[in-house]
């Protein structure tokens, strides 16, 4: 897939720019919000400190989740995943490899968990079918031949880079603007409202300003730091996960361990390679840009990964990488004992009394489109509020002018002329809120 030159073209004008919405973060969620806004006719600018998909979006398995991995412990996330799975197979099929997936039970695992797993998948609306282990070996020749149980689920793989680029292409073709290598350094506030951002343009080596009545913080784990520019607290607990990219594709299907989530329990094929992952460890927030994979993590990935597919031990490693997933503490428990692994949408006007600022975080690659929809719905809701206020102000001004004129008809024409654009715009936004773009 070729990238549209318009995405990366040099805008040239380095003066301050104004728009309806500023989106901070060029991962899948930010790109999805830009696309959703553009399709709803909302002018928007996306700002990314590096290039698109260089954060958590480009540092994951690339798994097209069926939701089965979450079904036992997190039914809500499982239901979100299977719904988005079906949608992405339709709207982003060029990014999807419809491999299907296997959940295998090994001798050291309990078959009792498989029963619980199947029941949980059924409750979440996931089509999970137990099959004979011998059939599983035929379907996936690379699987561990010692498996004692197998379940087929509608997993697949998805290219996160192609997905993000496709969203940005569609967004820019519908009027959105994107500025890469523009790092947000501060939020511009006026009273109790955010009205824009200060950025450093790394390409042109200068500071710039962008203005909008609404700023959306889609910075992922970096969103905590962005919120701090406005003296807001969003407590995140970074969870680092290391992965290995293997030299060729040894498996046809996604292979998972049918047990409680643990290190190196999934092998995802994609294009000509496969990815084994992940480890999971908490790291200090000030280390989120230090994503080195340790020798110990590599050993764990190999040791556990070859239990899924024994041929892994003879496969060359192309590279190792790590990503950070944002785990968000609930407002009533900042200690992190009750961190959220779901979608977190914060309207800071309601939460903190700061207008013009929204944060969308948490979630996962699989739910990026849903996160974008929620965030854009909130953008439209706030836009309607602003339009109503503007409308009332304009009507008041027109009424004052008309009161000084003897011809009453003039007032009626003026009112119609003033409110018609607002009525059309509000109606359009309400229609957009009902759309599932």
Image: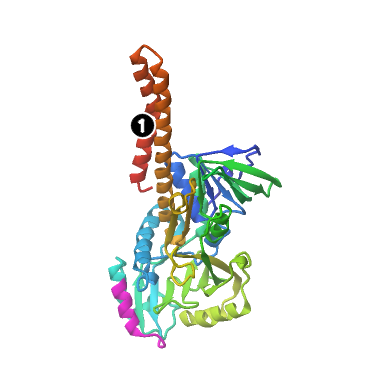
Residue furthest right as drawn: 205
Instruction: Indicate how the structure is coloured in the image.
Output: rainbow
Figure check: 151 above or below 196: below
The answer to which quarter of the image holds residue 13 is top right
Rendered location of residue 157, percent (x, y): 45, 64
Residue at x 62% of width, y 79% of height? 295
Q: Is residue 195 above or below residue 414?
A: below
| Residue neighbourhood size for the residue with mark 1, other residues' Cα within 10 Å, grouped as few (<14), some (14–19), many (≥20) | some
Q: Can residue 209 be seen in this view?
A: yes
Outermost residue toward the bottom in this view: 107
Point out residue 121 in the picture as x, y percentages from the top left corner. Answer: 31, 71
* Vertical comparison of 151 with 109: above or below: above
- Which residue position is annotated with label 1? 423
Residue 282 is inside the magenta segment: no
In this view of the protein, which residue sits in the foreground, 153 or 364?
A: 364
Above or below, comparing residue 171 to residue 359 in the picture: above
Could you tell me how many numbered marks the image carries? 1
Is 110 a magenta residue? yes
Question: Which residue appears at 35% of the width and 48% of the height?
Answer: 436
Instruction: Look at the image and tell me whether residue 163 can be seen.
Output: no
Give the residue at x 34% y 40%: 431
Query: What segment carries the magenta color?
Result: 107-120
Magenta stretch: helix, strand or loop mostly:
helix
Expressed as whole percent of the image width and height from the top left, the position of residue 322 reads 57, 69
Would you identify the image quadrant in which residue 17 lies? top right
- Secondary structure of the residue carrying tag 1 is helix
In this view, the residue in front, 295 or 432, is 432
Q: Nearer the viewer, residue 200 or 39?
A: 200
Whether residue 55 sits left or right of residue 95 in the image: it is: right
* Residue 152 in the image, given as x and y percentages of width and height: 35, 72
């Amino acid at each position: 897939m070729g990238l549209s030159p318009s995405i990366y073209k040099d805008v040239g004008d380095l003066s301050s720019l104004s728009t309806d919405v500023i989106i901070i973060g060029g991962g899948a969620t930010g790109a999805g919000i830009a696309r959703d806004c553009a399709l709803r006719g909302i002018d928007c600018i996306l700002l990314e400190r590096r290039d698109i998909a260089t954060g958590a979006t480009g540092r994951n398995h690339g798994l097209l989740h069926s939701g089965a991995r979450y079904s036992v412990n997190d039914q809500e996330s499982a239901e979100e995943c299977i719904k988005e799975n079906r949608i992405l197979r339709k709207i982003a099929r060029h990014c999807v490899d419809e491999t299907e997936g296997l959940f295998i039970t090994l001798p050291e695992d309990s078959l009792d968990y498989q029963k619980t797993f199947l029941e949980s998948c059924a409750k979440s609306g996931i089509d999970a079918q137990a099959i004979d282990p011998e059939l599983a070996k035929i379907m996936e020749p690379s699987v561990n031949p010692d498996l004692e149980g197998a379940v087929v689920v509608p997993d697949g793989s998805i290219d996160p880079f192609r997905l993000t680029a496709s969203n940005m292409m569609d967004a820019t073709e519908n009027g959105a603007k994107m500025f890469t290598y523009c790092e947000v350094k501060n939020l511009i506030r006026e009273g109790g409202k955010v009205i824009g951002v200060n950025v450093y343009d790394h390409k042109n080596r200068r500071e710039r300003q962008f203005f909008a009545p609404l700023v959306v913080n889609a910075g992922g784990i970096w969103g905590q730091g962005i919120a701090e520019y406005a003296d807001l607290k969003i407590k995140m607990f970074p969870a680092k996960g290391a992965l290995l990219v293997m030299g060729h594709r040894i498996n046809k299907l996604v292979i998972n361990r049918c047990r409680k989530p643990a290190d190196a329990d999934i092998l995802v094929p994609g294009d000509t390679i496969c990815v084994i992952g992940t480890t999971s460890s908490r790291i200090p927030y000030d280390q989120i840009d230090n994503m080195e994979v340790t020798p110990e993590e590599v050993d764990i990935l190999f040791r556990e990964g070859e239990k899924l597919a024994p041929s892994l031990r003879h496969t060359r490693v192309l590279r190792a990488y790590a990503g950070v997933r944002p785990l968000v503490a609930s407002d009533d428990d900042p200690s992190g004992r009750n961190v959220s692994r779901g979608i977190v949408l914060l309207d800071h006007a309601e939460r903190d009394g700061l207008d013009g600022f929204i944060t969308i975080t948490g979630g996962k690659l699989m739910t990026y489109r849903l996160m974008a929809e929620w965030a854009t719905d909130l953008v439209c809701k706030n836009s309607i509020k602003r339009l109503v206020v503007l409308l009332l102000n304009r009507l008041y001004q027109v009424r004052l002018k008309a009161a000084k004129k003897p011809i009453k008809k003039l007032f009626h024409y003026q009112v119609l002329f003033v409110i018609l654009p607002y009525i059309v715009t509000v109606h359009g936004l309400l229609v957009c809120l009902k759309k599932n773009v």
